[in-house]
Image (spheres, rainbow, N blue to C red):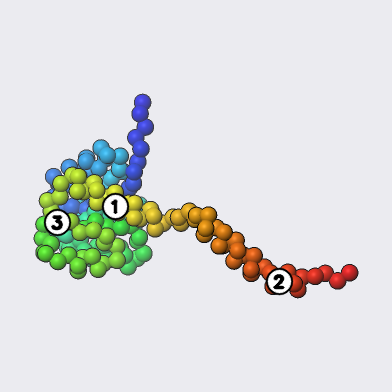
Amino acid sequence: MTIKQIHGSILLIDDDPLVLMSNVDLLESKGFSCHGVNSIAKAWRTTQNRSFDLIICDHDLSDGKGIQLIERLGAVGLSAPVIYMSAAIGHDPSHFLSVRLVRLVLRKPVDAETLLDSIRTCLNTASASQFPRLIGDGERELLLTIGDDAAAPGDAGSEVAS
């Protein structure tokens, strides 16, 4: 029996069943935990009950524009990064990139390698910002020196009378 390593939890939102199913299959085969939905309403309900490391969202959905969902999720404090995808994106994706959660905008069709590279980029960036980085010897010495300097004035006044 082999144990499958999970590389991250991803919510996929696309109203094209073939795209949704093929992307879920691709990502699960690469070790990601995926949940696919086909509408804004289902995505909203899903995010109220589960947390995700990454969201991949299409622009044109059956019940509205994906960017409206992403703005709403950001407004309620969701912090998962978003890869925003669409065939309808013009030459300037800056409007979509200005939305707080959106990290990357991809123009459909997106090949498997581009999608996987984009996911790795977003997940690596997200994990780097969630966890503090380790400090080096120079930084450690500086912090210890600052700590010694801060304690020095208190030492002079801490004499105990006998």
Q: Earlier in the sequence, mark 3 or mark 2?
A: 3
Please state the horizontal and vertical placement of residue 64, each as a whole percent of the image: 17, 62
State the image quarter where residue 102 is shown. bottom left
Q: Which mark is residue 107?
A: 3
Residue visible at 29% across and 49% down in the picture:
120
Q: Which residue is mark 2?
A: 154
Q: How many marks can you see?
A: 3
Please state the horizontal and vertical placement of residue 30, each as a whole percent of the image: 27, 39
Cα separation, mark 2 vs mark 1, equals 48 Å
Cα separation, mark 3 vs mark 1, equals 17 Å
Residue placed most toward the observer, 23 or 117:
117
In the rendered view of the protein, which quadrant contains the N terminus? top left
- Secondary structure beneath dot 3 equals strand
Cα separation, mark 3 vs mark 2, equals 61 Å
Residue visible at 31% across and 43% down in the picture:
33
Name the kind of residue labelled 2 in the image. Gly
> Which-is-in-front pick, marks 3 and 1?
1
Residue visible at 75% across and 72% down in the picture:
156
Please state the horizontal and vertical placement of residue 113, each as a whole percent of the image: 20, 45
Residue 117 seen in render:
yes
Q: Which mark is residue 121?
A: 1
34 lies left or right of 157: left
